[in-house]
Image (spheres, rainbow, N blue to C red):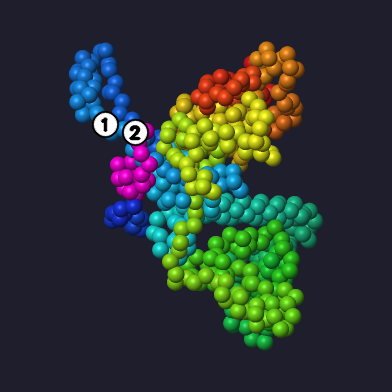
Amino acid sequence: MADTSDPVPATSNQHEASSTPMKVTPSSKGKPNRPKGPPLHQIYTLPAPIRTFPLPTFYPSNPVSFFHVAYTWVSQLISPPPAEPAVIHRGTWSPETRSVQVKDPRSIRALWEQGFFGKGNYSRSEPNWLKREHAKKGEHKGHVAEDHTAKRRQERKMMKWDRARKEQEAIQRTRLQEAWVAPVGPKELLALPNSERERKLAYSNAFGDDVLSPHQHASNGEKVESAVNGNETNGVVATAEEHPASTALQVNGHSSQTTTPTENGKSRKTVRFSPKVESTTFHLSDPPTLRSTIQTNGNGHAINGGPADGAPQSPQPTELGLPEPLLENFHIEKASSEPKSESAIVDREVLQLCPEETFYLVFALGVLTVLDPVTGKPFTPSDLFTLCRQVSYVPPRKTDLQPDDPFLINYAAYHHFRSLGWVTRPGIKFGVDWMLYHRGPVFSHAEFAVIVLPAYSDPWWKAEGREPPRRSWHWLHTISRVQSTALKTLVLAYVEIPPPFKGQLAAADILQRYKVREFIVKRWLSNRNRD
């Protein structure tokens, strides 16, 4: 094992390639120029924070491959590669969160880009809080994953609203068509229109403006909006006569129209507004509000620096119930609490590692050193192993540690799937223990969702009458339904619990007694699984 040193040299961290200035290539076909950085497969080249030097593949059908293998083996024999791990990162144990916090920015990027370990304490997954803060100020020209997520959610929200609006319009058209009665008498037949223009005029006078096309609705709405914005006289606005049919003003779903015949057979509409138009009712045809979707910087301003439309204003001191003598102090404290936009942003985000990830990096890979927050000295692997077992209980235990404590069960499954090449991450978001990614969360979604269950199949546990926790079919159906909705495959990982240990054993001797069995659970549907 290498000595502890400052984290991440140039040879072990691929993120330094991404920190170089991005090249902007001239776009074609009128597309805007977008900064392009290195591709993902170059940033996330290493699957673990260590480097390996395997021999090339030997193909018996290709004799040349034998010389390739021999040449590589002789080269590594004469000039052996550097010892791994070349860099050991440092973290501090946090008793409050029962996790390890890594504060060095280079170590944070290295642990994330080389195995996707941990999560940012201010982020959903990838520690990019500083990048998001710079993007809010317009100082970051690249893209932020959270911004793309918010944009997609807003697009889906507007799409759903537009679909609901079209459904309401279709229902309204159907009702109008069903309300029309065919003429059966002589007078009704003679009163039928003789031209297409007369037919539209009669149909519009009979049913109002609901039969207008969306473009006619939009033109009417633009006229009304322009009138409200400053072309009103004493609160009365009159629209132009562009359509033969009578137009109606739609304000939040309410139709207010006044139809008066003119000399040439056309109709005129007059709309009366109050000086201040306010709406207190909401209808299905109203678009969704943007108050909850506009991202602000905390001061009531949008990300681009201007005031956010629809952003709620901060309450006044009198609305908060403060007495008059405290108003001056209130304004002083409020002014002092507002951050200065001109000052540089300090990166306060740290990388949080759960106990299973921490012990895997310390025990299996040897790339992490955990420091005691009180003494500042590093934990030994055996001391860290005991500490993780103690804090896995609620409340934590100092003695009477059992073979089936939560840490041993979860770590056995975590180490099992990590050793198989899966990127294993916590799955609390989907109600499971672990999520399995093929290459990582930046490449694709998780393919499997794992629930870890203890199995007491050893004869010693049967003699003691120990049984695993009982699970109902209702619980299994709920978990399976959630995972199938999220397009995940549910995996039940049974960890065989060994009998209690005698004496003080090392972590390697304890963990080799555990075995993991995997079962895939799929929903049975009668219309798909009849055979």
Picture layout, residue 242 above or below residue 57: below
Pick whichever, 203 or 253, lies toward us. 253
- In this rendering, the count of numbered labels is 2
Picture layout, residue 90 above or below residue 497: below
Pointer 2 residue: 84
Pick whichever, 464 or 223, lies toward us. 464
Q: Residue at x 61, y 48 (%)?
A: 96
> Which element type, helix, strand or loop, lies under badge 1?
loop
Circle 2/circle 1 CB separation < 8 Å: yes
Magenta stretch secondary structure, dominant: loop
Locate the N terminus by quadrant.
Answer: top left
Q: Which of the numbered marks, if any, corresponds to residue 403? A: none
Q: Is residue 76 magenta?
A: no
Q: Position of residue 324 (x, y in %)?
A: 72, 83
Image side of residue 128 versus residue 276, left or right: left
> Which element type, helix, strand or loop, lies under badge 2?
loop
Q: Position of residue 217 (x, y in %)?
A: 61, 65
